[in-house]
Image (cartoon, rainbow, N blue to C red):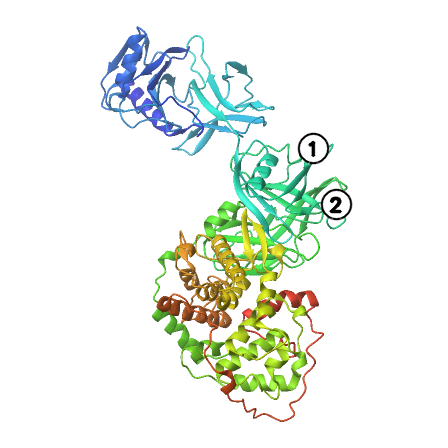
């Protein structure tokens, strides 16, 4: 009876140590099976064999060493009862022989008897003597790093899968590369780390007499090698480059990434170590203070600032290093808290973004809220208040993304652009994953699953816009589709112009009127007494044009097919647009196109509409070359889900304008160049559709009229492109000279409104918003009833 109980307990002991995990870096000889037999006093036998059955492999190695063993039957199958004279029960009632297999980087205790277990080449069979609960299988060995010459701690634990408990394994000896190393409690500490290469770790606890060892002896090999990590470089207004590298130090990784992407940089020596003085032309001290290039480290659970220079920091595998330009006031979001602590799904809550750092003057850790930052949660934008907080109406249970940024004009960012994810489960405080890679994984979306039917898609959105004519931009699509236009909008525009006077109108205001009046069938030569063509092309100065002014001026001139002689000609506008094109390097890609600010990178909206404006002039070699480069750049900017994001995220209007530009120059938005792993431009656009043919500005948000109207333009362009292989949405065959004059029926003397100057926008804001306003179909008219 005692032996039966002993066997049962031994079986349970074996199962309790099932699936012991070794470090992934364990290396094995893949040409044979290796067998190790150990008693409590030492290794009895070891050797290689070509046998793959566990019992056959053991039998061959033991016999080759002249060692005897006894095999017995039980209700559980055959088992080893004695080896080299050491019998089961010799060192305690529940002592005996047991075995494990080192397989695929794990210790595994098979659920079969030894004669029914098969091994593969490269695996190791361990037969050892024990008495529950010892010896422990070191099934949880952790390496603090595998990077060369970096402080290394190796920790030995036993994980019990059944009870979900971890036991420290103490009281054993260890060697690395044949040299004895000190074991402190359950760990080995090597302050200087190890050199690059393959190393051998041996651990054992053989006893004299009848004691049971604390650990199952074994020898594993592990590799110290250059770590693989990512580097992201943040400039003043956008990401300069991002990529994965494999190097010994953070600086070497940064240099490799920059060199591989042909980005200039300068590294300087100092008494504190090397530092980065310049990247991509942005040099330390640009703003005359202590501003310059800095860095921090991101991992899954934390963001930290190493207290060493960048050339001295040795990354771990999987580190994410953020190199950014800033000064002492530039924060990064390393402290994110939720209120309440446990967030319930679909219930309001707050997120606070703070920056925690060590203040050397106060000699203590300080936490400051990050105020005035733009935070994007699942593609919805917020701005942090003075306490660094944003208020969320509620989110579904599950994983959500966040992105934070705080760009400034002519000074360092308020906060470094960063991104990560958090998980709401309604039970615990939301868990954070600070890694860029986690963010990228969450926002990836498979738009290939979206059903596309251009006739149905177009009809649905057209029906909505036809019934809801809220802006004159809709006239372009409605006229092309033969739909009736609501002239109340024209009446309102006439009243507005009559009230303000033409001098209060921006260039884009006039351009919108010219295009939309022509689309409605009315003359731009006389609108409430103003010749809009004369006002724009003769009275305005092209030297004061912004890029969007020139683009829509060229579109308006071609849309009307006006052949009159003006001071501002088509040729001048084409040259102006070509001259304003820029080449920037972003994420290691050389991009060409148009933008309001080159430091923010190429703006896909502006580039798309610029292509449409230039499309009639592609017989010009310079235009053709510019168009080709811009198209290639848009393709490079497109991400896996089909979106082409700008510096602030992915928006439907962006895709709509890119589609208009591509179809105008004969490029297929569903073609090879614009089809990525999880979608093309058409499917990406449809991912913003919500209901009744309406589209949202941002993903998973409410319908937006301007987004819907612009999506209608894109859908028309896609359909006509499918029919003809090329389609310029802004093309028009109307004879503008034959258009009738709109008869304004309002008061002859409309009441004057306040001047269109001196509102809440400053000059810089007006410049930055100029193109955005025309894109969303708004006229930049600053009057009291427009907030």
Query: Does dot 1 land on a helix, a strand or a loop?
Result: loop
Quarter of the image for residue 493 reads: bottom right
Q: How far across and how far down the image is residue 260, in percent?
A: 55, 40
Say whether residue 1 is visible: no
Pick out the residue farthest to the top. 66
Count residues near mark 2 (Cα–Cα under 10 Å), then give few for <14, some for 14-19, many for 20+.
few
627 over 27 or under it: above or below:
below
The mark that comes first in sequence, 2 or 1, is 1
Residue 290: which disc? 2
Query: Does dot 2 land on a helix, a strand or a loop?
Result: loop
492 over 619 or under it: above or below:
below
Q: How far across and how far down the image is residue 577, in percent?
A: 58, 64
Say whether residue 279 is visible: yes
Count residues near mark 1 (Cα–Cα under 10 Å), then give few for <14, some for 14-19, many for 20+.
few
Q: How far across and how far down the image is residue 736, in percent?
A: 51, 83
For label 1, the residue is 273
Please tell me which residue lies in front, 232 or 378.
232
Q: Would you say 565 lies left or right of 52 here?
A: right
194 over 536 or under it: above or below:
above
Q: Would you say 772 lies left or right of 754 here?
A: left
256 over 496 or under it: above or below:
above
Residue at 37% x, 74% y is: 459
Residue 736: which disc? none
Q: How far across and how far down the image is residue 38, in percent?
A: 38, 14
- Looking at the rendered image, the quarter that the C terminus falls into is bottom right
Quarter of the image for residue 29 reads: top left
């Amino acid at each position: 009876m005692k032996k039966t109980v002993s066997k049962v307990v031994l079986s349970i002991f074996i199962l309790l140590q099932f699936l012991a995990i070794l470090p992934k870096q364990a290396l094995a000889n893949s040409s044979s099976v290796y067998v190790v037999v150990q008693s409590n006093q030492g290794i009895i036998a070891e050797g290689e064999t070509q046998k793959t059955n566990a019992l056959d492999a053991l039998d061959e190695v033991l016999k080759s060493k002249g060692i005897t063993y006894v095999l017995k039957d039980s209700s559980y199958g055959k088992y080893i009862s004695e080896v080299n004279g050491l019998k089961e029960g010799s060192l305690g009632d529940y002592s005996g022989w047991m075995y494990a297999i080192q397989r695929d980087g794990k210790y595994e205790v098979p659920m079969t008897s030894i004669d029914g277990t098969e091994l593969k080449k490269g695996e190791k069979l361990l037969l050892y003597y024990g008495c529950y609960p010892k010896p422990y299988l070191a099934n949880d060995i952790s390496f603090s790093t595998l990077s060369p010459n970096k402080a290394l701690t190796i920790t030995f634990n036993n994980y019990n899968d059944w009870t979900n408990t971890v036991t420290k394994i103490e009281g054993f000896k260890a060697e690395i590369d044949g040299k004895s190393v000190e074991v402190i409690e359950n760990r080995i500490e090597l302050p200087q780390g190890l050199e690059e290469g393959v190393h051998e770790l041996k651990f054992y606890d053989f006893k004299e007499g009848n004691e049971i060892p604390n650990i199952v002896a074994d020898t594993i090999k592990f590799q110290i090698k250059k770590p693989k990590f990512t580097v992201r470089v943040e400039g003043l207004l956008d990401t300069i480059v991002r990529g994965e590298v494999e190097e010994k130090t953070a600086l070497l990784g940064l240099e490799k990434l920059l060199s591989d992407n042909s980005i200039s940089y300068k590294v300087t020596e100092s008494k504190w170590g090397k530092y980065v003085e310049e990247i991509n032309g942005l040099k330390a001290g640009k703003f005359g203070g202590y501003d310059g290039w800095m860095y921090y480290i991101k991992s899954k659970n934390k963001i930290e600032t190493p207290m060493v220079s960048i050339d001295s920091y040795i990354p771990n595998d999987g580190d994410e290093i953020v190199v950014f330009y800033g000064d002492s006031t530039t924060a990064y979001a390393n402290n994110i808290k939720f209120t309440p602590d446990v967030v319930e799904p679909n219930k309001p809550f707050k997120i606070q973004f703070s920056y925690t750092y060590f203040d050397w003057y106060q000699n203590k850790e300080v936490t400051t809220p990050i105020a005035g930052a733009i935070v994007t949660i699942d593609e919805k934008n917020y701005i942090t208040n003075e306490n660094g907080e944003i208020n969320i109406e509620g989110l579904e249970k599950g994983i959500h993304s966040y992105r934070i940024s705080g760009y400034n004009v002519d000074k360092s960012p308020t906060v470094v652009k960063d991104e990560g994810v958090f998980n709401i489960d309604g039970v615990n405080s939301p868990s954070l994953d600070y890694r860029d890679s986690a963010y990228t994984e969450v926002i990836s979306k498979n738009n290939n699953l979206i059903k596309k039917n251009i006739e149905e898609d177009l009809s649905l959105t057209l029906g909505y816009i036809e019934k809801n004519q809220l802006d004159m931009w809709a006239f372009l699509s409605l006229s092309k589709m033969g739909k009736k236009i609501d002239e109340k909008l024209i009446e309102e525009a006439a009243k507005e112009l009559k009230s303000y006077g033409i001098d209060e109108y921006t260039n884009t205001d006039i351009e919108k009127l010219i295009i939309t009046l022509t689309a409605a069938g009315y003359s731009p030569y006389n609108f409430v007494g103003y010749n809009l063509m004369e006002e724009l092309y003769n009275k305005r100065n092209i030297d004061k044009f912004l890029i969007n002014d020139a683009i829509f001026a060229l579109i308006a001139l071609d849309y009307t097919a006006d052949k009159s002689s003006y001071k501002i000609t088509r040729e001048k506008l084409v040259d102006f647009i070509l001259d304003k094109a820029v080449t920037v390097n972003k994420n290691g890609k050389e991009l060409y196109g148009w933008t309001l600010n080159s430091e923010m990178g190429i703006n896909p909206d502006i580039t798309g509409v610029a292509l449409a404006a230039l499309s009639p002039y592609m017989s010009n070699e310079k235009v053709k070359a510019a168009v080709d480069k811009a198209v290639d750049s848009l393709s490079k900017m497109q991400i896996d889900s089909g979106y082409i994001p700008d510096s602030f995220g992915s928006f439907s209007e962006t895709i709509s304008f890119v589609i208009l530009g591509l179809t105008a120059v004969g490029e297929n938005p569903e073609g090879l160049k614009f089809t990525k792993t999880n979608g093309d431009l058409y499917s990406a656009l449809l991912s913003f559709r919500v209901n009744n043919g309406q589209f949202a500005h941002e993903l998973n948000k409410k319908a937006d009229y301007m987004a819907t109207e612009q999506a209608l333009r894109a859908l028309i362009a896609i359909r006509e492109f499918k029919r003809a292989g090329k389609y310029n949405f802004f093309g028009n065959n109307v004879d503008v000279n034959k258009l009738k004059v709109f008869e304004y029926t309002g008061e002859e003397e409309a009441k004057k409104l306040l001047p269109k100057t001196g509102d809440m926008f400053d000059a810089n804001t007006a410049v930055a918003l100029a193109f955005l306003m025309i894109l969303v179909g708004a006229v930049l008219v600053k009057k009291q009833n427009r907030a």
